C-alpha cells in the first residue's frame, strides 16, 4: 500500500473550505484503495467530526494527540477521542510541534498512548540542516530511537515513519529533498527500526517522505520506493492532491 497523506496544519480558515476539498477527493478514494493507494487527510482536529464520512475509503487522522487517554488537561485532545470519531491515524512529532517545545520524550509517550488507542502513528523525524560530514544521519537515527523509547515491539504494526527534513518544509524551504536523499535515509531508518523491533517487524513499517512534495516531484519519490508521502501545502489544493493520488494509482500497477 502507498499512503498519500495530507497534513493540513492550521488550514483552511473555514469548515466550508475544508469540506470543499474533501468533496473533491472523496470520490477518488475507493478506486485508489483498490489499486493499493490509501489517501488520508489530517485536517485540524476541530473539523474531523464534520469531515469523516461513514463507509468511505478516504481515511482521516489528527495532527497531534495527548499522551493521556483522558484527564484534566485543558485544551488537549486524546488519542482515544480521535479514535472514537473514526480517525485512523495521528501525526506525531512533526517538526512544527517540536519547534513549539515538544521533546523526543513527549513524542515517545504520545506514541505509546496512540498505539494503545489503536491509531496508526505517522511519526515524523528529520534533520534541521545538512552538514557535509553526514552528521545529520546520526541526528535522525538518534531522534527516531528517542521518539520510540519504550514503544512496545508488539505495537510496531501501528507505526509509519515520515522522513521530513526540516529544511525542506514549508514556504521557507530551500527545496524538496531528492528521491535519492530519501532512499539513503530510508536505509538508515530501516536499520534503526530493525535494531529496535527485529528485522521482520522493522522491514514492514512504511517509510514516507514529506517536505515540499508537489504535483511535479511526488511520483519520483514513490517510484524511488517511498511507501508514501506526507504533503503540506499541495494537499490543500484539491486539484493538486487529486492529481498526486491519480498518478500514484496509475503507476502502482
Ligand atoms: P510542505 O509540503 O508544505 O512543505 O509541508 C510538509 C509538511 O510539513 C508535511 O507534514
Image (spheres, rainbow, N blue to C red):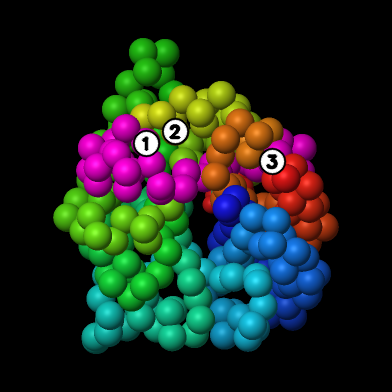
Query: To which quarter of the image does residue 179 belong?
Result: top right
Instruction: Residue 186: give its label.
Output: 2
Taking the image as shown, residue 71 lies to the left or right of residue 64, namely left
Q: Secondary structure at mark 3?
A: helix
Taking the image as shown, residue 248 lies to the left or right of residue 7, namely right
Viewer-closest of 130 and 83: 83
Asked whether residue 135 is drawn in magenta, I would say: no
- x then y, percent, for residue 166: 48, 39
- Which residue corresponds to the image point at 64% horizontal and 55% vertical from the top-left? 36
Q: Mark 1: give few (<14), some (14-19) or many (20+) Cα within 10 Å.
A: many
Asked whether residue 218 is drawn in magenta, I would say: yes
- x then y, percent, for residue 168: 56, 36
Residue 150 in sight in this render = yes
Q: Residue furthest left?
A: 150
Taking the image as shown, residue 190 lies to the left or right of residue 68, namely right
First in sequence: mark 2 or mark 3? 2
**Residue for badge 3:** 218
Image vertical order of residue 253 relative to residue 141, above or below: below
Residue 124 in sight in this render = no
Tag nearer the camera, 3 or 1: 1
In space, the residues marked 2 and 1 are separated at their CA atoms by: 6 Å
Say whether marks 2 and 1 touch (CB < 8 Å).
yes
Amino acid at each position: 500500500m502507498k499512503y498519500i497523506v495530507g497534513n493540513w496544519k492550521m488550514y483552511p480558515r473555514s469548515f466550508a473550505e475544508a469540506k470543499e476539498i474533501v468533496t473533491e477527493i472523496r470520490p477518488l478514494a475507493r478506486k485508489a484503495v483498490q489499486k493499493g493507494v490509501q489517501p488520508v487527510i489530517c485536517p485540524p482536529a476541530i473539523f474531523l467530526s464534520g469531515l469523516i464520512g461513514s463507509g468511505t475509503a478516504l481515511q482521516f487522522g489528527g495532527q497531534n494527540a495527548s499522551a493521556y487517554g483522558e484527564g484534566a488537561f485543558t485544551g488537549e485532545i486524546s488519542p482515544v477521542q480521535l479514535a472514537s470519531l473514526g480517525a485512523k491515524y495521528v501525526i506525531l512529532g512533526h517538526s512544527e510541534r517540536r519547534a513549539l517545545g515538544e521533546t523526543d520524550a513527549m513524542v515517545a509517550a504520545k506514541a505509546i498512548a496512540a498505539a494503545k488507542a489503536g491509531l496508526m502513528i505517522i511519526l515524523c523525524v528529520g534533520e534541521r540542516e545538512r552538514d557535509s560530514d553526514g552528521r545529520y544521519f546520526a541526528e535522525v537515527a538518534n531522534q527516531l530511537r528517542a521518539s520510540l523509547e519504550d514503544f512496545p515491539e508488539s505495537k510496531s504494526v501501528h507505526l509509519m515513519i515520515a522522513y521530513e527534513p526540516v529544511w525542506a518544509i514549508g514556504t521557507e524551504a530551500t527545496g524538496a529533498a531528492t528521491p535519492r536523499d530519501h532512499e539513503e535515509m530510508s536505509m538508515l531508518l530501516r536499520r534503526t527500526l530493525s535494531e529496535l523491533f527485529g528485522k521482520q517487524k522493522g522491514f514492514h513499517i512504511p517509510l514516507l517522505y514529506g517536505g515540499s512534495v508537489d504535483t511535479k516531484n511526488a511520483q519520483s519519490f514513490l517510484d524511488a520506493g517511498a511507501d508514501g508521502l506526507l504533503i503540506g501545502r499541495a494537499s490543500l489544493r484539491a486539484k493538486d492532491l487529486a492529481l498526486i493520488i491519480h498518478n500514484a494509482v496509475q503507476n502502482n500497477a
